[in-house]
Amino acid sequence: MKISLRNPNVVMKLSRLGSFHQSKLSFLRSFLKEFKGWDYKRDLFDLDEFGYGVAIYSFKKKDRVYSLICFANKLNENERSDRVIAKKWDAAFTLHDGVPTKADIERLKNEVPKQEVGRLSYKELTLSRANKSVRVFDHVVESLSNGIQPDVNLLSKVGYLYRTTAVYGSGKFGLADRFRIKNREEICGPFRLEMMLVYLVRQFTFDQVNHVAKNKNPKKAINLDPEICRNLGIGNSTGLGMAPFIVNHPTLLNNWILARETALKTIREIEDVKKKDIDLFLKCLKRSLKNITSWNTDSKYQQKKIKSLFEDLNKFINFVEKKFDFSKKFTFNKIYIWLEENTDEECIEYVVSMMMEPYDYIVTPLVKLMSSEEEKYFNIPTERTIANLKDILEKKYPQILEIDFTKKENNQNFWFISKNKEEPRLADRFDENGSELEQPLAIARDVKKLYERLSVSKNSSTIDKFLFKNNDLRHVVRRAFIIEKFPYSEIQDNTIGKSIIPIDMLRLKLSFFGALKFDPRSDKWLRICMFQGAPLPEQLKNYDDHWVYNSLN
């Protein structure tokens, strides 16, 4: 039986995209799988009694070495900020290509803590910084220094000792441009080096807290229990700066979504599902309930989604255990149809992620297709006709073309870059000044504007002639020819409408990173946890690939 890929006009709605969860396709999980056979080592740990100094961690395989260099510095409480405009952080990091020399370390000691103001070289691949969760870090130090393990209930509510505030790569601030490294097989997946940095930073936080506790009370101090370490991740604060990314990288977005949709389609097409695969699917499903019951947030919006997810999952588990016949053909297709008919988007997409767990042979080849050489699709085929372009818009944006942008609620917001904060922002067009500085992120409105202008143009005329008079719409003409080839390249929603929930855009990207426990702090920024429950570096060579569904505190 042949199953169609899901309709982009359904999948690419923000409410659906904002219900995505991590999966085997997520970048942090594919990173762990790729690097499980590499040799891990802590090469340098030169910290003073208060935990300030330099540390180096590495992954090595044959002649290839990646080294994380950590700089931990004293930070006054009034200097600590998670904002992108902060000037100082508790720690700063760079991932170095190879083994750093003493000269490299001295050079980087002066540059890495400066972050955006500093300058790196082609030897550096990624750059980041992080701040302590001071309450948790100090509690762990105090506990360990007194010879006892910390309060796991407190730790579970936060989930990390440090949170990053940015991770940079691909040529920024002098870092190596992607063309230098893109052909390395071990980093062919998207954001793989960024995931490596965050993973090694996680280990540094454990080593640092142990070190500080030991120096505080050398005779009595103990190390943080490895199982507690495993159940801690790295936090991250993410604001609207991430939202433009998924609009500005349409072919990359398509390849992420297409991989997921292809995996789902292939799994639904399996005629005879093996018992061991069903058992693994159900095992992960039941284990994962602990992830949901330990998902803490003060956001009423997210609490409602969590409650709905938990209720739907329990309903689904009751269905598959008591009413579903697993001996029938096309098991997962029947399960998927039941989900669509009986549960909400949050649960549907959660179980879609879960369906991938037994199927390495389906998922692993797709990971290698999730990058994109975007510049290949930048040129506009100017010899094509107005009729061609209109046809693309009618087929690919049918619901967008129905939006009436003369209505205030459909034109309510505009995106801009804050001069003071240097971050993307969303403002009310009718209450705030500055709409003349609007960023080109209102794709739905511009698609509609393009269609209206095409409708009064001659069908046989060519695109070059149209652009000569309508250059202000060049960006959306380009997008139309991209979506012709890449069906999941476009959000099928109005990103300036009154009802937009911006964190849906953030959550989409973060789900592909592999984030857990989304914690919205408003409708415009959220906190997440990464690598919570993941194996520690010394456990990597022999770890459970389904670790994300193991019971977490």
Image: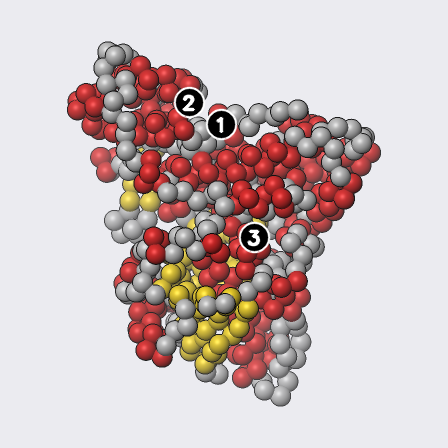
Which colour assignment does the render follow? secondary structure
Q: Position of residue 445 (x, y in %)?
A: 33, 26
Q: Reading the chain from its start, which is encountered first: label 1 or label 3?
A: 1
Q: Secondary structure at mark 3?
A: helix
- The residue drawn where x is 58% and y is 66% is 537
x and y, in percent, of residue 263 in the image: 58, 37
The CA span between labels 2 and 3 is 32 Å
Q: Amino acid at mark 2?
A: Lys
The disc labelled 3 sits on which kind of residue?
Arg
Let me know if residue 81 appears in the view. no
Q: Residue at x 65, y 43 (%)?
A: 359
Q: Secondary structure at mark 2?
A: helix
Work out whether 77 lies above or below 347. below
Q: Nearer the viewer, residue 348 or 90?
A: 348
Q: Is residue 456 left or right of residue 208?
A: left
Do labels 2 and 1 touch, CB within 8 Å? yes
First reached walking from the N terminus: tag 2 or tag 3: 3
**Residue extending farthest front:** 62
The residue that disc 1 covers is 8
Which residue does the numbered mark 2 point to in the structure image? 396
As measured in the structure, the alpha-carbon distance from the residue carrying label 2 to the one carrying label 1 is 8 Å
The amino acid type found where label 1 is placed reads Pro
Residue positioned 55% across, 56% down in the render: 34
| Residue annotated with mark 3 | 29
Q: Earlier in the sequence, mark 2 or mark 1?
A: 1
